[in-house]
């Protein structure tokens, strides 16, 4: 990083003076990447709790056999809404928030390329979620057919149906606009001297993710538009009675849905690839191979979708193709895991909170990856399909995977954003509580699934009682532990804590660490000078 | 950064954004067309 110099222009003083607008206007008309990043992150945090409360309703109902608290129809609404909110409202916006905050600072740009589009991308989100959440008070309740919206079941949704479709369209528009902005920024606004391959891993993984978003969000939008016309305009795209094909919807949905999984995990790979080198005090092992691995994962994500549909029936050739292509993903993912471990190997490691979350990510995401490999095996999948084993698998990928990476990123960059250090002791307490409770919640679900407990049911046979009770206790503990996270975030926002230097950590790599903490309202008025071949992560 | 360079970047930004927007719209209508052809 010694090759980087940050030059302020002669007129830097007057520029710094036209800082943020005052009051509510600052947030409603925000065009600054940091303000919009903050909005995204706070929205995502609120949605984590909104979706988390729904998870706790589910786990409370499942605490013991028999119906306890809620009607089965409401239970189904909770599983559907929990998934939609966590995927589209919590995990995706969290990573977009991190991208907004960090990408311009990492590539030496003054802001995102299209700031007004950025404002629209964000403000569409709360509107979409108000529409979706309003279905909870409609006659017939919220959508209850699962987040996958399979016809013909979803077409039986009551008044909530058009609300669901409209909100999914809005979420898609928001994601596509955000992705366009990210690609345009990375392609056109890198500081001179920063070649594509030299970009930090977080930037690289987001570039690939943004391409995935542009490729697949329109497909989801197209599929739900066809659902809408089937319901209201007399078409029969997916209605067997009219000559349509309901399985076609599943193909289209999963052609979106599987890349969507990587949309939620690739930026997490980027975060971990930034944090591990800092706390191992070594450059990232195999930077270029990490880039190629991320691109390979993105490519493979388009040719594996039917592994979600083995039980719908397909020719043997199809089963074999989708089984082997799915297994192939383990190769580039293995490259990544190997490189993170090799980065830590013989490093001068220290275990601050971001590093703890990152190391846990490597371990626990790998468990989710392995159970994914088990699900890829066709004869085994026919046994596991629609069981709690699947629930265990994707929660291992998304909670100690994506969510832990978001937490690691917040702990890593929060001192840079706020200018003060969070309470390290509380951070470690938060980590250990989260790590213990997340495993207590999701690990027993593997056993439940293997023993035959189906997913999406409010009641179950008494043989599943013990593991369900353990999982429910874990979920309550995990939820309560997150209050510590919120407390620390707001302490930093209020400026309570030790002031930090520009670098924050021990000699981290990257342009963002050359800016003061907190960074000025306009990050780089002039592009910083970097030498060819400088390392940025 | 010169004014020429700034204008050039702005032009490239608009061009890339329009191109990506068109790709997204093409995918959206393309998949609906696929549904129509399949029906």
Image (spheres, rainbow, N blue to C red):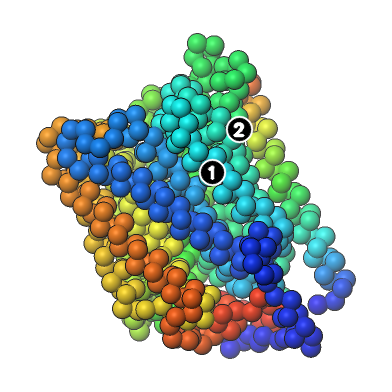
Q: Is residue A428 above or below residue A308?
A: below
Question: Percent from the top left, x then y, of residue A13?
Answer: 75, 86
> Where's residue A14, x and y in %?
77, 83
Residue under the point 59% across and 59% down: A207
Residue drawn at x 60%, y 82% is A515
Q: Nearer the viewer, mark 2 or mark 1?
A: 1
Question: Is residue B39 visible in this depiction of the protein?
Answer: no
Q: Secondary structure at mark 1?
A: helix
Q: Hey, which quadrant is residue A226 in on the image?
A: top right
Which label belongs to residue A402?
none
Q: Which residue is mark 1?
A: A130
Image quadrant where residue A326 sits: top left
Q: Is residue A400 above or below residue B4?
A: above
- Residue A181, image x and y in percent? 67, 57
Left or right: where A536 falls relative to A116: left
What is the x, y in percent for residue A230?
57, 20
Marks 2,1: beta carbons within 8 A = no
Chain-order first, disc 2 or disc 1: 1
Crowding at mark 2 (Cα within 10 Å: few <14, some 14-19, many 20+): many
Residue A189's image quarter?
bottom right
Q: Residue furthest right?
A: B4
Q: Residue at x 73, y 53 (%)?
A: B17
What chain does badge 2 belong to? Answer: A
- Nearest the eye: A416 or A259: A416
Closer to us: A96 or A302: A96
Task: Work out whether residue A46 or residue A225 is closer to the camera in this orientation and state it.
Answer: A46
Quick check: can you spot residue A117?
yes
Q: Secondary structure at mark 2?
A: helix
Subunit bearing disc 1: A
Q: Which residue is mark 2?
A: A222
């Amino acid at each position: 990083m010694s090759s980087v110099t940050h030059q302020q222009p002669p007129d830097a003083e007057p520029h710094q003076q036209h800082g943020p607008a005052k009051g509510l206007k600052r947030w409603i008309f925000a065009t600054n990447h940091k303000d919009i990043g903050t909005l995204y992150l706070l929205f995502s945090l609120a949605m984590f709790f909104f979706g988390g409360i729904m998870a706790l309703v589910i786990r409370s109902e499942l605490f013991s056999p028999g119906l306890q608290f809620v009607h089965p129809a409401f239970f189904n609404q909770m599983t559907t809404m929990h998934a939609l909110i966590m995927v589209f409202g919590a995990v995706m916006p969290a990573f977009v928030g991190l991208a907004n905050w960090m990408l311009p600072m990492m590539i030496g740009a003054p802001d995102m390329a299209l700031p007004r589009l950025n404002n629209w991308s964000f403000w569409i989100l709360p509107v979409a979620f108000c529409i979706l959440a309003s279905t909870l008070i409609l006659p017939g309740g919220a959508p209850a057919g699962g987040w996958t919206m399979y016809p013909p079941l979803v077409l039986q949704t009551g008044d909530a149906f058009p609300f669901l479709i409209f909100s999914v369209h809005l979420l898609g528009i928001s994601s596509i606009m955000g992705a366009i902005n990210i690609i345009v920024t990375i392609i056109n606004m890198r500081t001179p001297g920063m070649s594509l391959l030299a970009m930090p891993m977080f930037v690289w993984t987001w570039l690939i993710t943004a391409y995935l978003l542009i490729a697949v969000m329109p497909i989801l939008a197209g599929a739900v538009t066809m659902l809408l016309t089937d319901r209201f305009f007399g078409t029969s795209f997916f209605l067997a009675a009219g000559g349509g094909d309901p399985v076609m919807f599943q193909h289209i949905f999963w052609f979106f849905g599987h890349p969507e999984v990587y949309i939620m995990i690739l930026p997490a790979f980027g975060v971990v690839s930034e944090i591990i080198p800092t706390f191992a005090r070594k450059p990232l092992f195999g930077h270029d191979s990490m880039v190629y691995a991320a691109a390979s994962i993105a490519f493979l994500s388009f040719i594996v979708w039917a592994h979600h549909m083995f039980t719908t029936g397909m020719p043997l050739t199809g089963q074999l193709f989708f089984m082997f292509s799915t297994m192939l993903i383990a190769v580039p993912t293995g490259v990544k895991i190997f490189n993170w471990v090799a980065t830590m190997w013989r490093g001068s490691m220290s275990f601050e909170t971001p590093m703890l979350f990152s190391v846990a990510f490597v371990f626990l995401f790998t468990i989710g990856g392995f159970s994914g490999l088990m699900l890829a095996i066709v004869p085994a999948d026919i046994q596991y399909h629609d069981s709690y084993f699947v629930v265990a698998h994707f929660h291992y990928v998304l909670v100690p995977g994506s969510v832990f990476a978001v937490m690691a990123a917040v702990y890593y960059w929060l001192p840079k954003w706020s200018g003060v250090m969070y309470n390290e002791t509380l951070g470690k307490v938060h980590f250990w509580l989260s790590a213990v409770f997340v495993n207590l919640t999701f690990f027993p679900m593997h056993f439940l699934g293997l023993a035959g407990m189906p997913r999406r049911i409010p009641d179950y046979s008494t043989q599943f009682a013990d593991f369900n009770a353990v999982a429910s206790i874990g979920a309550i503990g995990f939820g309560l532990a997150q209050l510590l996270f919120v407390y620390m975030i707001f302490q930093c926002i209020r400026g309570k804590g030790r002031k930090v230097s520009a670098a924050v950590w021990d000699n981290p790599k990257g342009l963002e660490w050359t800016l003061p903490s907190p960074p000025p309202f306009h990050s780089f008025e002039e592009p910083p000078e970097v030498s060819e071949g400088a390392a940025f992560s | 950064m010169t004014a020429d360079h700034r204008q050039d970047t702005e032009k490239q930004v608009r061009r890339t954004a329009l191109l990506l927007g068109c790709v997204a719209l093409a995918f959206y209508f393309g998949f609906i067309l696929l549904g129509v052809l399949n029906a």
